DNA sequence: CGCACATTTGAGGTCCGTCAAGGGTAGTGG
DNA sequence: CCACTACCCTTGACGGACCTCAAATGTGCG
């Protein structure tokens, strides 16, 4: 355990700071203790496009963003626990269990990609916005009032919608009494069951084995 | 090398055969030597939905489909080289390079997920169909005439379109002289540059560093 | 031929993107 | 305190892309 503390390094980033991502010396694994990270990838026209968010308590894997020149930026004050490649290799040699955990971590990343894939595949605007809100709410630990770290335009980039459509759907949710918006970036989930129902996802029934 | 041959196992599946996917004894890594595999995941209404295809020469990773009850089915005659979990661990102990390859394999899977994400996010029907055809063509090794192992409805499930829209876009491509359709499932790519242009992807320009 | 099935084509409706015009709030300077 | 600006969010009208429904056209098989 002392070895773990010696290997990991805690970094603090301010609002808007870029998180370094040099491929050779890249942080091999990282755990976000506090704050939020945004991951941007270059869009078709060369401009950057918001791709995903990382909330406190979630991990970054070696492979996650940085294949295609994506950038990682801190939102708010963020504390990041990082471990470089050689440090992880040394640690993995001493603690075989760590390798299993790394695979689980990658599995989470693939599961998340799968979530986005179904969200973008065949969902309506309403279902996309509801899905995103429900997902963010769960990942933030179901707080009484959750904070959206990005604006409508960027919510639209993630869901494949325009900022106007995002706005319309969120107001519709508010009119239905599913959420409350004290400020545009403050969301209170009033009817969690109703929100889940609007996502269009099956309520996690047991898989009927043929 | 003799050890590798002893560890891997070659299985042959016929058209429509299900590939076993027991989580405990699951094939840890697998290489598809011949044929095509389809990966289905349960849709929102309980029905199965085509999620992705695996062509000959491509690999299956331990984490790929099977998190959410996905099924793997062979199309045509398929030969699959598999290696179970304990076999891979033993092999990785003897050959450290293997672990690096496994990470690269997972990286490919995440890159593929990213491809789908951009495809489904903000592309038109034309761009989606062109992207999918160009992608399949590249993955099949740019044959003179490529074979589509699934029908229009299933192409639609992957691209998030209806079968009618897929059909319309493919005929439009044919009328433009970009592809030729001798049979509905036989596609000859006549103008590869034109097809790439219609995908809506940037032509892989160097990333302009701020 | 008759049937089953996949693809193609057409007509109409709907959802969402586009364009445009307000509103709300924070920050700045008088 | 009050402009005044800048920025984001909201709301509306309109058009187009794609879905839905329906019919026609292959294509393989008994």
Image (cartoon, coloured by chain):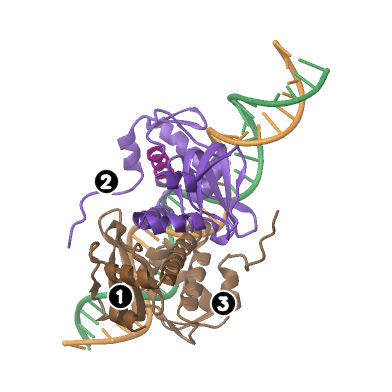
Chain colours: A purple, B brown, C green, D orange
Q: Within 10 angstroms of label 3, few (less than 14), some, or many (20 or more) residues?
A: few
Mark 3 sits on what residue?
B176
Mark 3 lies on a secondary structure that is: loop
Which segment is the magenta one?
A129-139
Residue appearing at x 31%, y 78% in the figure: B80
For marks 3 and 2, give the CA distance: 45 Å
Tell me if residue B96 comes above or below residue A183 in the rendering. below
Q: Give the quadrant of residue B68.
A: bottom left
Marker disc for residue B41? none
Image location (x, y in percent) of residue A206: 20, 52
Q: Using the rendered image of the protein, determine whether residue A53 is visible from the camera's viewpoint.
A: no
Q: Chain of mark 3?
A: B
Residue appearing at x 24%, y 72% in the figure: B18
Image location (x, y in percent) of residue A174: 43, 31
Mark 2 sits on what residue?
A203
Which numbered mark, 1 or 3, is in the foreground of this view? 1
Mark 1 sits on what residue?
B82
């Amino acid at each position: 355990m002392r070895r773990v503390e010696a290997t990991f390094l805690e970094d603090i980033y301010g609002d808007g700071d870029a998180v370094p991502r040099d491929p050779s010396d890249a942080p091999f694994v990282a755990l976000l203790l506090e704050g939020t990270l945004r991951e941007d990838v270059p869009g078709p026209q060369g401009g950057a496009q918001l791709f995903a968010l990382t909330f406190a308590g979630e991990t970054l894997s070696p492979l996650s963003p940085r294949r295609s020149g994506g950038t990682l930026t801190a939102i708010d004050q963020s504390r990041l626990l990082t471990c470089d490649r050689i440090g992880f290799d040394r640690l993995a040699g001493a603690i075989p269990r760590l390798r299993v955990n790394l695979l689980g971590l990658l599995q989470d990343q693939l599961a998340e990609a799968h979530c986005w894939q179904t969200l973008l595949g065949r969902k309506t605007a309403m279902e996309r916005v509801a899905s995103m809100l429900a997902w963010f709410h769960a990942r933030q630990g179901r707080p009484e009032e959750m904070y959206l770290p990005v604006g409508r335009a960027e919510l639209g980039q993630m869901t494949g919608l325009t900022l106007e459509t995002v706005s319309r759907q969120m107001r519709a949710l508010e009119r239905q009494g599913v959420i409350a918006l004290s400020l545009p970036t403050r969301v209170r989930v009033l009817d969690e069951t109703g929100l889940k129902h609007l996502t269009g996802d099956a309520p996690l029934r047991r898989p009927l084995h043929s």
